[in-house]
Image (tube, rainbow, N blue to C red):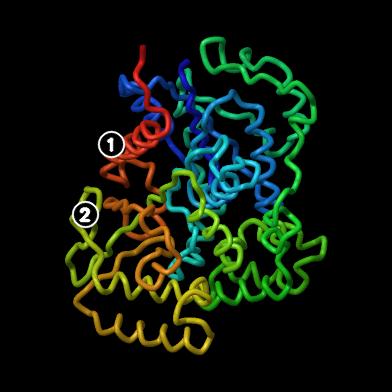
Amino acid sequence: MTTLVHLVYIHGFQGDDTSFQSFPLHLQEKLSSRIPPELDIRFQSSLYPTYKSVKPISHATQNFLAWLKTQPDGPVILVGHSMGGLLAADAATDPSNTDELGKPKRIVGVIAFDVPFLGMHPHVVVSGIASLLPKDDGKKKKSEKEMNKHPQIQIVDPKATDEWEEFKRRAHRPLSSEFGSSQLDVPRPPASPSALSLPEPSSPHSKETPRSRSPSPGFFNKTINKIAARAKENDPLVRWLRKHADAPFSAGKRWIVERFQFGSSMFDPYDLGDRYDRLVQWNGLWVNYWTYTRPEKKGKSKSPSPTTGEADPPNEADELDNDIAVLDSGLVDSKSEANSQRKRNLLKKGRQNDLDKSEALVSMRHFIVLPTGMGRVLGGSEHWERVPIAGVDDEVAAHTGIFIPTQNVDYAKFVERVADKVFDWCGNLYGQRKG
């Protein structure tokens, strides 16, 4: 019997319906046209709607897992961009996805694109947040629905996140009228209504744990100060945050507080560390494709060439710069020599001095903190793969341009690279000779 492999795309924090561009279509076409004869599988893709991020990430995760129950049977590979990858990791490592032997039940893999598992790099704390917020430049853009027309690509109804109860009721009606009879297998509703209810908390990682707590006023102010310390004095985002810092939990300040319940996970070492530990120990398959560019220096371009990145290996400045970011995140305190604030500050100062002396070297500019150098103690570095983005000027543009061919000038090869990863995973899991 042919195995249906379901790829589910998850947008980043406040992402819109243009984030993935035409990548789902291009990957679906590449996968469908190249299925090896030894694999009796077929592929289906779904673009999960943007989560509006007004509740904690644990809420979004449980909502997603409940939606997944409405989908056709078969292994699932989650494809997450930016903070969408945090949600993907939480869903994959949720106890409901693990059998008695510790193996994944349904979600077997996570493909992450520039996901801040260890936080955003300090270079882009402010510009990075701004890049994740919705923008309206007045230009009409094609939606992902327009860019990904394919009989095996489903654009999931936005009600799956925003109006879940209504979506559940609609799930009991055939979906073929919406997607066409030649498109997807129609999801069969469970035998009992309870099968569609939100999964009950069943582990220390449920919404009663610190991982799911709302940010305290102290943490909120600490986050603002961290952002402000790295921003220009008149930065509009900082001014806006400070304006709402006096009473963040009052009803009139609900917007920023609710969104920081989701967005603050990028700044909370406990939340980041807990999730990353679970991902490293998870028995499923995962990869994090991280983007970078190398800025110009002294009139000479240092931008990476369009390759897989092997021709532009990290240098001493790269490692020193990332060590500073790792120390800044606070993630390594309990696992390395930086086990106190004083030691962390001394180490950070020493690495900054060494970096300042490396005038001949230009460090990579990347959006996220990496598990290199001091970060190796966190584990999982073998799952991180570089993606040079040559057609951009900075790391924020690299982060948002990974799916844009004019910015990711090696885009075609990148699609092939991801397809090869999927086939490799499927070969390991479901390889079998037909007939």
Left or right: residue 40 compared with residue 217: left
Q: In x, y percent, where is residue 90?
A: 59, 50
Query: Few, some or many C-alpha atoms within 10 Å of disc 1 (few <14, some 14-19, many ≥20)?
Result: few
Q: In x, y percent, where is residue 165?
A: 78, 33
- Residue beneath label 1, please? 412
Mark 1 secondary-structure assignment = helix
Question: Which residue is pictured at 62% across the width and 63% down the height?
Answer: 264
Q: How many marks?
A: 2
Question: Which residue is pictured at 63% across the width and 76% down the height?
Answer: 222
Q: In x, y percent, where is residue 298?
A: 19, 72
Closer mark to the observer between disc 1 and disc 2:
2
Left or right: residue 112 compared with residue 359: right
For marks 1 and 2, the one nearer the N-term is 2
Q: In x, y percent, where is residue 325?
A: 43, 72
Mark 2 secondary-structure assignment = loop
Which residue is more in the foreground, 33 or 180? 33
Disc 1 residue type?
Ala
Disc 2 residue type?
Glu
Question: Which residue is pictured at 30% across the width and 70% down the height?
Answer: 318
Q: Point out the residue furthest to the front here.
A: 101
Res. 310 mark: 2
Residue 408 position (above or below residue 340): above
Quarter of the image that includes the C terminus:
top left
Res. 94 mark: none
Query: Few, some or many C-alpha atoms within 10 Å of disc 2 (few <14, some 14-19, many ≥20)?
Result: few
Residue 13 position (above or below residue 260): above
Which residue is more in the foreground, 149 or 375? 375
Residue 108 position (above or below residue 215): above
Question: Which residue is pictured at 17% across the width and 66% down the height?
Answer: 300
